[in-house]
Structure formats: structure tokens, C-alpha cells
Amino acid sequence: MSVFLTGYWTAFGKDEYFRKFEVYNMEWPPEISLETQSLSSAPYGGLIAVVRDRRKIVQVHGGSKPVVSIYNAAGVFVSSFVWDSGQIIQMGWSSACDLLCVREDGQVLIYDMFSNWKHKFGMGQEAQDIKVVDAKIFYTPHGTGIAVLTTANTIFIVNNVKEVKVRKLPEPPGVNNHPSAWIVVCEDRCSRVLYARDKDIFSLGEGDTHASMLNLNLRDDASSIRDMAVSSNNEMLAVLSSREKLWIGSVDGTRCSRIFDCWNMSPQQNCQLLWCGTDAVILKTGLQLHVVGLEDENISYTYEDSVFCIQEIDCIRVISSYSMEIIQKVPSDVRDIFKINSTSPSSYLVEASKQFQKKSHRANEYLHLVKPKLFQAVMQCTDAAGHEFDVNTQKLLMKAAQFGKICLDDCSPENYVTMIRILRCLNSIRHPKIGLPITLVQLQSLTMQGLMELLMIRRHYFLALDLASFLKMPDSSRIQLHWACYKVQHSKQEPEVIAREIANKIGRAKDISYKDIAVEAFDCGKHELAVKLIEYEPRADLQIPLLLKLNENFLALNKAIDSGNTDLVYHVLGHMGKNIGKAEFQMAIRNFPLAQALYLKHCATHNIDLLKDVYTQEDKHKLLAELSLKEFLAWKNSGTGDASLVAAHESYKRAKMDFNVQMCDEQLKLNKYQKGLEEKMRRAFCGLSLNETLKTLLLMGDVKLADKLRAEYKVPDRRYWWLRIQVLGEENNVIELEKFSKHKKSPIGYEPFVDICLKIGNQREAVKYLPKVKEELKVQYYSKVGMMEEAAQIAFEKRDVDALEYLVPKCDPVLSDKIRQYIRTLRK
Amino acid sequence: MTNYLSGGKVNLSQLQEMYRKELLRLIDKCDGPKAIVWDDALGVPFGVIAKSSVLRDHNVLKMYQLNFGKLPVLKDVKNIIFISRAHEDLMDMVADNIHGEERSGIRKEYHLFFVPRNTTVCRKRLSEKGVLGNFTYIEDIKCDIFPFDYDLLSMEVENTFKDLYLYNDPTTLYQAAQAIQTLQSLYGPINKISAIGEAAVHVNKLVDRLSREPHDFPSHSQIDHLVLIDRSVDLLTPLVTQLTYEGLIDEIYEIKNMNVFLPADKFADSNDEPNTMISPKKTVILNSADELYAKIRDKSFSAVGPALNKKTQAISKELEERNTDRSIDQMKNFVEKLPALMENKKSLGIHLTIAKLIREIVDSDDFNDTLKLEQSLLIGVESDKVQTYIEDMIAHQVPIFKVLRLICIQSFTNSGLKPKVLEYYKKEIVQTYGFEHIITLSKLEDAGLLRVQSSGKRVYTILKKTLKLIVEDGSETSPTDISYVHSIYAPLSIKLVENLVRTGSWRSLTNDLMLLTNKIVHPQQAIINNQTRRTSIGSHASSLNENTKVFLVFFLGGCTFSEIAALRFLSRQDEPNNNVEFVIATTKLINGNTFLQSLVKDP
């Protein structure tokens, strides 16, 4: 095997090699001809867009409108569409696999890789007015940029097609001639354009106020610049002059590595200048491909057919009608192993491993040669395997690494295992169906996340999921989400079926929100599907906004009620209130008790009339009555508001609450009576309770009137007596009090008379009532009045030990001794 | 200093810590010197979460109470942060403040932090007032439940019961479910849930619903069992006078956010400092940070006197030691102890004064007569007639809630009042206290606190027997049953919990419980995904080793201090293989007066 391996190698300088190998046999139809069609592709094994070259005259098949066809890197057909919107100036790919088509009027039309129209943006009014003649698509670490050149030789630039901000670049000084070449260079966050006019190169920076000139010595005064190329890392520059001089140096023009004379290569019109990593400049002239090194190396490849080259960060891809090849400098690890007569440890290790598999004793000899540097050899073999596209070579190298690893005492398997995973990953994405022919270096630069992103965009969900779980990557949910969104967009099945399928796949994944999927469905105008999907969303606060957007008011209301989150119910009600009429709204929420309750509660503080409306409709007479009562109470003290009271009365009647009806009646009567009193007595009565009215009358000395009122309202004896006593006490009228006590037997006993006298501090009067106090309370009341001896005496007579004990602490020492004596006597 | 919140098996200081971080994170978002304008109801609970010194470290220069009108002039302040609950009237105040500031013409940045979360209605209100756009940040501080003590959490939402049973508005129940979610996110999934009453079943449903949303719980379960109790199942207990020390402080002076305001002049002597206070109220913080208080708060008041006595003797003995001869070492020892000793002495002084204040009231005839009636109603002596004592109370126009409490107790113990009796009371009340109380009474009826007797079973009589609610000969000083918290009555709610703890389920009681409510969720495994289940089995084993099960008892609609005392009493009972510890959560701490007041108050 390895014998043939170096067969594809070409020596490049003293100790370096270039290799060229075929990756794919292009699967596209044989009509594809690079002679008549123009190709655009992108780094990282980008897709290829093919369209008829408008500059070439060919026989037109079919319609007159050009067709844009999209293939993957292996020539597998992806999609196509008819182009019918004007002159394409430039076509290219964004790093997110969107096809960018720059039109003459500065409009950039964006299609996805499946030929679906996405959107478009303009490069500004000025660009539109003066027409675009050329455009460049470039890649920054943050996205894809576009620069356009107008007929007036001004340049407009957009740094990221995802956030379009058009900036105008400064104009080069002097006569405003058309540039002979121009390219975009990216530095950190800003970009600048190198603008070549005749033999001068101007640097036009984004933030600059004016252009600066690059100090670049072509050593050829008479010529003008024909083409330029900048390396993928934006550090190296290649400039081709019209007199076939190739200048190679740093991008700022200060350092020149080499000036190469290529007159004998006869660069023609369709030449291509590009960088192969930073190792060499590739100059394609006709069927010839020249690899020009930085020092004095150069080699050439010759093709039988037209080819198209794409610059990658560490190689170039060469596409012909039949195949796709990669040309790169042989990575040093690979070179050290397979170089003829190599004496590197890794080379010996590979040999040892081969002998070992042949079960030859020579394995040991080779191993001996490596022994001191075995670890290094294992590492080299592992790394070299990563650089190989051929599976057998990969196996060979990994076996060698494994063999070496066994012979080491403590070699962590991590590196080895990681590489095996990466190789599986690389091999599967390089499969023609997937068509991502990227190298290990490219994968590292792209990162695994970036790769997943690409796979998702290309709808290789299954592979992406597989890889994510195989590589133990954490964010497989993003892939599922992406898949679900795709499913939503494209599936033609019944909404029910789609929703169920998605739910079955995704289940209750933690970081996926069904809301996002449902919103996708909504954005595609798939109403029913959106409703079905949102059903799976566990969080009600996410469900509801979308349901309202979908105008599914009742569903939203149901969800809100189910969630128990009343704020959501208010939210839905607010939305509904705005969108449907009041009557309809009130009817609608009748079937939702919670919603209605909340609505009514809200009305109670914001709109009483609405509340009344609903109560009336629902025959809630009791509640209506209470509303009227509240109205009445608000006016109570002013003596108005009888109308409300009458209304309450009526409502209670309808509610068949007789007692309350009666209360209202009495209150109406009382109101009237109080008004009468007010007129007669010139005092405020309105708003007083019946008791207060009675009290006021009594305090005014109008006992007769009070008695009459009391009789009318059937105030119980007890309460009236209490009131009388209380008032008489307040008036300090002991004479009347005594009279009152004698006019009838007291329904509340005579204790209150004692109490009231004590309250007004009249002990003498209090004593008067003591004989009438109930027997069982006598001890207590005698002591209350302070007649402790008598109290003790009574208690003793009643043989009441408890009462005596109650008295002890309240008496002076002499008396308490006596009481204790009593107690002892009784206890005997 | 050790944190008094971390005293339980479930360390509630973690909750405090989480809220503090969240609060400070949001405050730090506002760059520059700040002033905070607090919703009055949040000031104290947030004081527990982050002390003002901590806020000062985060560049909070000033703090104000949210009110109508214009804010004071704040020269060096760049940010004004409003921290408020989502109430419309509070939004009006915020808007008023901002209008005032805008008129003064000085540009400031305004921020509005909602506790626990903003609402559509409030945002709409702000936008109607034209200030919604003025805020740089509108954030939520998702503080659903506040830690009050090592075993006590309160949501501090007053109207749960009223909203639910008068307006059918379950808003706070959602917040309760969120609070449970928060607790699970800190202390692991709760695998067993029991619920009784409509609100409880509703919350259980919501917890279940929320568990289906993405969440992140630690695998180790620290709480074994969640018991949800709807206040409507036991409306009797809040009405009965609380007779524990803490309960009485609350009955008489009303404890708010674990603070109580007492007449300052009574403390003048015991304070050892010149009485320079202008405020007529002295604030006393009541929680287990005060060692002495933690010991006596749950005791029956009659046992508090002796306990304080003992403590007094102990302290004076220790203080006397300084007068005896001693070595340098001993003296050094003493001096080290001195600050703690002085702290104890100060606390003792405070509690002696409080006890004296309470003693005066407890010894009064009014108090005793009321208690006597209350107990006879509970025992059930001739309790279905019109009670003369209640009549006389009305005649004397004592505060109406005292009257209503007794009538409601009568209604409950008789499974409703006879129509004649109820109408008689109603008429008495309306004629005496005024016509407006016709609405008060109607609300009590709507809420089920007042009822007309129906021909069905006498629920209270049955439950009294099966659950042993009345213990007439229990000891108050060395109790053996939870009934000591109300002298003779064991809170129905806690009897239910006790039963659950003892038998592990309510099934043996089902028939009796059905009399209270048909909304019961028997203990069941909560729905959890496989992963947490596997680990929770492991943790179950470990909690078996420790032999103590942790119950989270969540009262929906409020709980009383007597109920808390009863639960603490239960957890102190040593029973082999059945040790329990309780974490008590409630929507609000209530007593009979505050409960009825909030119910009757207009929204």
C-alpha cells in the first residue's frame, strides 16, 4: 500500500512534498461542462452552484431563462431553480450554506441550498442607482460578508449578511479609473479592500477616512496588476502583474518573499490565482496548475480538461467534470512516515507494526530502533491517520499507533480514542451522499459545533444526532429542534400525524420548547399544526401568547385556566375583551366559571355597571341586592340613597330572602323616621343605628319617644334595659336609675346596677342594689363593692370554700387570717 | 453568629440565602447609587432576607415606604427602585411617585421589582397611568414564601381564604404551588402528598401540573411528606381563643411579621436606658433567635409564670457569682459569659413585662366570661339556644368581632344555628352595630362561617368524639395532649395531622372526613420522573436511618400560633420509630380577629 502512496507525491523543494489525490468521482450529469458553465463554491467542502456562464456563447437547451443547479461537493444533485430576476453579477455561498446572488442593482437575493427563496437585501440606494459591476463574497470569523463595486468605482461593504449594515469605503485618490483587480482582506472585526489600479494598490479600510497606498515593489514599473489573492488566514498576499510577474509576500506589502517570473506559463484570460494554505500560491492557467512556493520551489500539474479551483485553509479543491481532487502540501507527520528511506521513529513503528501483523520477528528489531522515541512515534502515527482520506491508510496508521501504545508503560488512551472517533466522524461526512470532503485541520477550525450546524442546515439530522451521541456532545436537543422545524416546514402529512411524530421523537426533552416548534409552524402559516404542537408544550405561559396569536381564544382560555395561573387568565381575557364585543364576550365566558369569577372581581373594582349587567343577566339577585346596599351605604350618612335601598329591597325579594327584605323595610322606615327627627330636633340622626338613635333620644331625655320607637322595632327587653342603665350612668343620674330599677322587675338582674354605680364611682349607690343581687353572685359583688367582711360572711354561710379562697388574696391580712380560719373550719 | 433559621432538619436559611442572592443580583443590575421604595408589607419580611447593612454595601443609600405623593429630594441617588407586590393600588402609588419626580425635572432611572411576580393587570394599570415606559428594569423577585423561623414559612398573603370562597379567585393558590416548587428546588422532591379541602386539592393539582414543566430538583429528598390543609376544613380553630403565650400576645397585641408593638411606657424601667423614645410603641421581635422566648412561647400561659420565675432565679444566681471570691481564670470565664448573660437578662425583662401585661387582661372578668362561654359552646352544653352572654355583649357594644367569633363558634359546634336563633342574632347586630353589617353577616354566611342548621348529621359532635377534640381534665403546665393550646380544645386541623402522622394515612378516618369535605387526596406518591425516583429511594433509606420524618404542613388560608404550638408539641413527643419534625407553611398567620376582619373588609 504505502508503496503506492508516495506515487501521488511530488517533491517540492528540498524536503517537502505536494500531494494530489482524488476524493470523489463527480456524480453529476455529463452535460456539466466547465467550459460553458460557471461554478461557485465555498471553503469547508462547500456546495457547488452551477449556472450557465453568461459570458460564454452556447447553444441553449430548453427555456431561455438560466437554471441554477446546486450540487454537493461530490456532484450529488441537491436542488435547482430557474433564475428569472435580472442580471447576476456574482454568486456565492454564505458560511451557513445560503446561496447569495448579487444583482446588478445591488440587491442580494438569498436562497437556501434547497432552492427555497429566503429573502433579499440591498447594498444601498447609491449602489442601486449607479449599478454594480463586480462583487466579492468573503468569510470572516463572524459570518459571511459581501463587497460590491459600482460603475463609479465606489465600493460598498456588508460585513455580515445576517445583520446587514452597508458601509461605503473611502475612494482611492487620483483619477477614478476602473480597478484592474480588487480583493477583500479581513482583520479582526473590520474588513478592508485592496484596490489595484495600474501598478498601485490602495488599501481602503472600513473606518478610514481616506485610502492609503500599499508600498509594494513589483520590480516592474511598466506593468499593471492583473490579479490578487489573499491567503485564508489573511496574512499572505499574491499579486500577478500583466507582465507575468508573480509577487508573493505579506498582506501589508512590506515583506516580499518571492517574485516569480511566469511569462512562460502564459497566463490567459481564465486564469485563477489562489493560495494553498500558506504554503504556496496556485496559479491556474488554462489546463495547467502551477504551484509556486515561497522560496524557490515550483511544480506544475497538467489537466486534460478544464478545472475549477477552490481555496481551502490548508489545501485547494480542484473540480473537473469528472472528479474532485485535493492538492495539498503533505503534512509533516505523514511525510515522516511514508517518505522513502525515512528514518523517523514513526516510520519504524509503522514498519514494526506491519511485521508484527505478518508475525515476523523483525517487528521486534524495528521496535528496538524506535524504543527511545516510541511515545512520539505513537503520537505521530495517530496524527498522521487524521490527515489521511484513505480508510486503509488510516487503519494502517492507527494499528501502528495501537501496537506502539501497547509497548508503552503508561500511555493514556485518550488521544487514540479521540482520533478514532474523529476518523469515524470524518469518514462518514466524507461519504458522497453527505459530501463534506473536509480535512482534519478544517474540522478543527470549523469545530464540532460548527460541523453539527452544517449537518443540520443540510438536513442530515440523523447523521448529526448519531454523531452527537457518538461524540458525546451535549447539545443534541438543538439538532432535534432543527429537525422538528424542518419537519414542520416540509411535511405534507396531516397536522395530527406530524405533531405526534415530533412528540414521539423528542418526548420531554429538557431544553427543547415545543413553543419554538409551534412558532415555526405558525410562521409557515400552518395554523392547525401550530395548535397541535403547542398542545405538547408543558409551560402554559409559553402556550398562551401563541394561541392568542393564532386567534384560538377559547383554547387559550382553557389552557390558562388549567394552569392555575390567574395572571394568564387575565391576559387572555384582556386580549379577548379587546377583540370581541362586550355582549359576546360576556356570553362567551359564562361557560368558564373561573374566568367569569375573575372578570367579575375585576369589574367590582373597575366597572360596577358591567358587574350589574352580568348579575342581572345571571339572575344573581342576592349579589345585586348587595351592590345596591353598598351604594346605599356610601350615601347613608347624607340621608339620601333611599332609591338604592329600595332596589336592594326588590332584589332581596326576588332572591326570596325574607329576613333581609324585612331588614330593608325596617331600615327604610328608620330612615324616614330619622329624617323626621332631624327636622324636628335640628340634630343629626341619619346614619345612626337603631340603638344609637334610641341612645340619642334617651340622652336628650325623650324617654317617651324612645319607648315608642323601641316598641315599634321590638327591641328585646334585655338590650333596652342595658341601654337605659348605660345612659343613666353616663348622665350620672342615680335618682332616675333607682326609679328605673323599681318600676319593673329587671330582666337582666340587678348586678348591672351595681356595676354602673361602681363605674361612675358611686359606691354608696351601688350598695343599695346589693340585696337584690343573685344569691350565687353575692360574694363576688360584695367583694367588688369592697365589703369584704360581708362577702366572707356570706361565703362562710354558704359553706363555699372556693369563694373563700377567691377572697383571701383580696383582703387585708387580718381578714385573710379570719377567712383562712373559716376555710379550716369548713374543711373539717 | 448562628442563624436562627438553620435550627431545623430542613435548613430554611438556604431559602433566605437564595432570596438574598436574587435580590442583590437584581439590585446590582442598577448601576450607581440607589434608593429603594418598599411596599409597606414587604419591608419587614425582606428585612429578614437582607439586612439594611447588606443593602448599604450594595450602594443602597436610602430606603422609603411606598406611599402616595412625591418622594423626598434624592440628590446623590441615580436609581430609584420600587419593590412592590402586584396590587393595583400600589401601582397607583408608584405612578404617583414617578409623576412627582418627573415634574421636578431631575432625570433618574426607575426600576420596578415585583414580588413575587408581575401581573398583566398591573402592567396595564401602569401603562394607563403613562409610566410603564419609564422603567429601565421591570423584574420579578420570585419570593413566594418568606422564612419566619427555623420551622415556619409564611407567604404573607392576607386574602387567600376570602378570595377563594367569596370571589372564587384562586390566585394565591397558584403562588402556593410555586412556593412548593421553590421548596422542592432547594430541598428535593416531595414524594408523598396528602391534601384535604377544596383549596388543598387544587394546590395538589397545580403542584402536579408544575412538576410536568421543566424543573431542576436536587435528588436528595429532605421533606418526606407534604400535607395541604384548606382552612375551610377547620374554620373553628381560628375562632377559639389561643391560650399559649405567643397565642395570647397575638390575640391581644397582634403579631405582624413576627414583630409585636407594645405600649412603650410599660418598658421604660426594664430597659435600663433613659426613655428617649418618642414612639409610643415598642417593637419586640418574636422568634427563636431569642432563646428564652423559644422556650416559653408555646407553653400554656399558666405555665409561663413559673418558667419565667425559674429563669429569673437562674440568672440572678449567675450574676451573684461575681460577688464571690474567685480566681483570675474564673473571672475571665465570667466576663466571657457576661454579654450572653446580659442578653438573657434583657430578654427576661421584656418577657416579664409582656407577661404582666397579658396577666392583667387574662385575669379580667370579661376575658374569663368570654372564655367560659366559648368552652361551654365547645363542650356543647345547651349550646343551640340564643346565648344571653352574647346578647349582653351586643348590648354593651363590645367590638363586633368578639361577638361574631362567638356566634361563629356556636354555629360550628351546632352544625349551624336554628333559623330563629340566627335571625335573632342578626337583628340584634344590625340594630346595634348598624345596618351595614347586613353585608358583614352575608359574607360570613357565604364563607360558611355562619350557617342555618340542616337536618343532616351533627358533624362537630361526631368529630369531637372520634378525634377526641375536647379534653377537659388535661394539664396546662405539663400537657400530654395538644388540647392545652386552647385549654380544653385540640385544634381540629392538628388532630388531622396527628392522625396522619400516627397512621400514615387518612383512610381510617375517611367516613368522618367526608363530613367535612369530599375533597381529599390520600397520601400518594407524587408524579416524578424515573431518574429522581431512583435516587429518592436511596435517600429514603438514609432518612429511615435517622428515624425522623419531615412533614411540611401547608395551611391554605392561614394558621394560628396555637396550631403552630400544637405541631411543635407533636414533634417533641418521643415515639419510637415515629419521630417527626414539622416545617409549617402558611399563606398568612392569623387569629380569630384578623381572620374575620380580612374576610369582612371590602376588597
Image: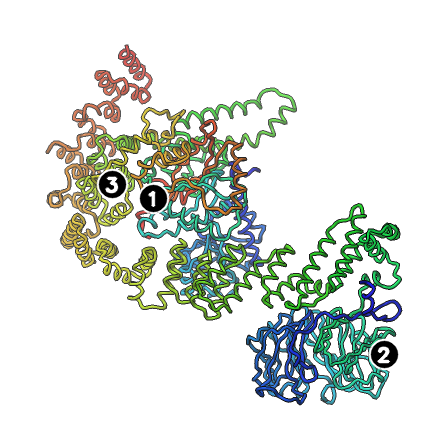
Label 1 or label 3, whichever lies nearer to me, is 1
Q: Chain of mark 3?
A: B
Residue A474 horizontal/vertical position (percent): 61, 55
| Residue designated by label 3 | B397
Dot 1: within a 10 Å radius of its alpha carbon, few (fewer than 14), some, or many (20 or more) residues? some
Residue B115 horizontal side relative to residue A561, left or right = right
For label 2, count other residues whose C-alpha is less than 10 Å away and answer few (under 14), some (14-19) or many (20+).
many
- Residue at the spot x=69%, y=62% of the render? A426
In the picture, residue A220 is in which quadrant? bottom right
**Rendered image quadrant of residue A797:** top left
Q: In whole angstroms, how far apart are the C-alphas of marks 3 and 2? A: 113 Å
The residue sitting at 30% across, 50% down in the picture is B166
Q: Which residue has dot 1 on it?
A: B519
> Mark 1 vs mark 3: which is more N-terminal?
3
Tell me the residue that label 2 is attached to. A259
- Same chain check for tags 3 and 2: no
Q: Residue at x 81, y 63 (%)?
A: A2
User: Where A349 falls versus B395 (above or below)?
Assistant: below
Which residue extends farthest top? A828
Subunit bearing disc 2:
A
User: Quick check: marks 3 and 2 in contact, CB under 8 Å?
Assistant: no
Hey, what amino acid is under mark 2?
Ile
Secondary structure beneath disc 2?
strand
